[in-house]
Image (spheres, rainbow, N blue to C red):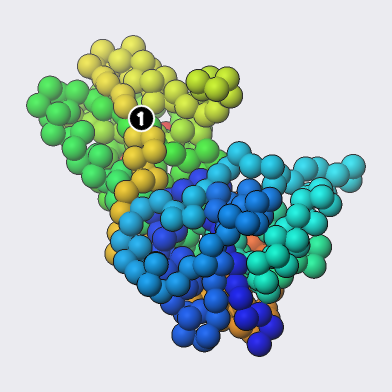
Amino acid sequence: MPASRLGILTAGGDCAGLNAVIRGFVFAAAARGLEVVGFPEGYEGLLHPAGARLLTPSNTLGIEATGGSILGATNKGRFQTRRGPAGQTILPEPLVRAARQALEQNRVGALVVLGGDGSLRTALQLARSGVPVIGVPKTIDNDLDSTDVTFGFDTAVTRIAEAVANLRTTAESHRRILVLEVMGRHTGWLALHGAVAGGAEIALLPEFPFDGDRLARFIKESERRGQRSLVAVVAEGARAKAGRQIRRQTSTGDSRLGGIGTYVESLIAARTGRETRSCVLGHLQRGGAPGAFDRVIGQQFGVRAVELAADGMFGRMVSYRFGSVTDVALADAVNRTRTVSEESQILRHARALGIFLGE
């Protein structure tokens, strides 16, 4: 057995299903006689190895139904890769040493990282430095190229669909157009699936810059057909053909994507004369209990991670392809964004449903 004690951490932003993965990992490890150590606050926990704690079936019982992460997570830590002179990704050597020391101090033979593309890039650098690492894909954006599904996505889509349904009632009552801004910096999977699931008429995606004039015509034509209300789902990274992505200043002084919903609201009101309102779903997409699908696939991912560790298959990432849980090389999984394209079946079906996509 290559490793008798396994480590696990949750890096990057939180999402529904993290605890399901942890639960599946712990229970599967225990069945093989392996111990599990959880490092708190993502990669930052490797800088404070004394804070690691033993995870057992008894202290993880029932967590698959809860949101967030019992280990905590951070996307603002010191474990950040940087670009080398040749453009390659580099993790500073002091951080690699700190990771090795943390694992040695806790007698951990392999580390499982739950994270998105950025966190898995760090995991890949650790793996290339000789640290035994296994990745588990985590992002509600569902934009990792080497897996068909990431846990947390299904629950986030459900949140969006529920929000669309709730907005519909007030939109119908007041003959309004309501714009819902959702997450999605570079890809529109959330907005597109959420629009289809919720029955929205408009979905604006980062992959397809929208034409304001055509959007206005679509709304006017809908009004002529007697439609009282419209709901638009807009990804935060969407932009008009003649413009750029919209950013806003946060309370900490950072600049991040946000504000496209308000922009679209103003555009629609100005060009159609229709009463329009916008709202931002924000972190409501990330939080709360995971749905059944994410509880199931999360635990399956945890089980597969244990199998990989038990077989000494490090430098791999758990993956879901063609209906089965499998794995791929970490090097083949990171830095490859899966975007909505003309070949995407869901895009073609959205058009067939009459959803306006900004074109």
Q: Is residue 357 left or right of residue 314?
A: left
Point out the residue furthest to the left here. Answer: 173
How packed is label 1: few (under 14 Cα within 10 Å), some, or many (20 or more)? some
Where disc 1 sits, the SS reads strand
Q: Name the residue at 41% across, 74% down.
A: 57
Asked which quadrant contains residue 338, the reply is bottom right
Count all numbered tags in the image, as a single digit. Answer: 1
Front position in the image: 21 or 321: 21
Q: Is residue 297 visible?
A: no
Q: Name the residue at 60% across, 67% down.
A: 7
Front position in the image: 282 or 149: 282
Asked which quadrant contains residue 345, the reply is bottom left
Percent position of residue 333, x then y: 64, 62
Q: Name the residue at 69% across, 47% down.
A: 79
Front position in the image: 151 or 220: 151
In the rendered view of the protein, which quadrant contains the N terminus?
A: bottom right
Residue located beneath label 1 in the image: 280
Callout 1 amino acid: Val
Q: Is residue 335 left or right of residue 198?
A: right
Percent position of residue 133, x then y: 68, 67
Point out the residue furthest to the right here. Answer: 85
Asked which quadrant contains residue 279, the reply is top left
In the rendered view of the protein, which quadrant contains the C terminus?
A: top left
Front position in the image: 191 or 340: 191
Asked if residue 181 is positioned above or below residue 174 in the image, the reply reads below
